[in-house]
Amino acid sequence: MDVAAKALPPGTLVTMRRADDTPLGVAMFNPHSLVAARLLDRDAGRAIGRRFFARRLERALRQRPERPRVQERQAAENAQLCSNRLEVQSGTSTPAPCSRARS
């Protein structure tokens, strides 16, 4: 990484280029990270902003399998039961195992 790249603030949008200097895509760059660039889109001219991220999140949510509300409520109740049990057992070296929420 050269001096100019190291001077870029984290989150800067950059055009990534191949060895032959053709654009690879647009990326978010952070010179302080082990993975310095995160490719956001292969279209180097793509506008990256609120709309871009909103569409990405909407697409990701559409691809998630639907979970019935009952399962979500049971999962929340189970998490609360586990939390309460851990608080009660905090004086021991091993907390009691959490059981599944009642149906």
Image (cartoon, grey):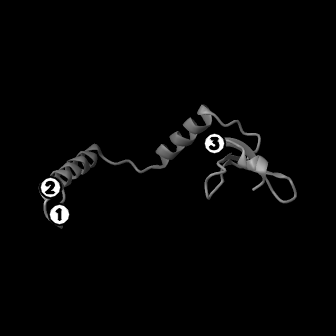
Q: Identify the amino acid type marked 3.
A: Gly
Around disc 1, counting alpha carbons within 10 Å, would you say few (fewer than 14), some (14 to 19), or many (20 or more)? some
Give me the residue at 17% from left, 52% from top: 81
Say if residue 70 shows up in the picture: yes
Q: How far apart, in angstroms, are the residues tagged by discs 2 and 1?
A: 8 Å
Quarter of image, res 45:
top right
Q: Quick one: which residue is furthest to the bottom in this view?
A: 94
Q: Front-most of 6 and 11?
A: 6
Estimate how packed mark 3 is, as few (under 14), some (14 to 19) or many (20 or more) residues with alpha carbons within 10 Å. Answer: some
> Label 2, label 3: how many angstroms apart (C-alpha)?
42 Å
Q: Which residue is mark 1?
A: 95
Question: In the image, 69: left or right of 40?
Answer: left
Q: Residue at x 24, y 47 (%)?
A: 76
Which residue position is annotated with label 2? 85
Task: Name which residue lies at 75% across and 48% down.
Answer: 5
Residue at the (41%, 51%) spot, across then down: 65
> Which residue is denoted by mark 3 in the rendering?
11
Where's residue 34, x and y in %? 61, 58
Residue 31 placed where, x, y %? 67, 50
Residue 75 rendering spot, x and y as whole percentages: 25, 51
CA neighbours of label 2 inside 10 A, class few (<14), some (14 to 19), many (20+): some
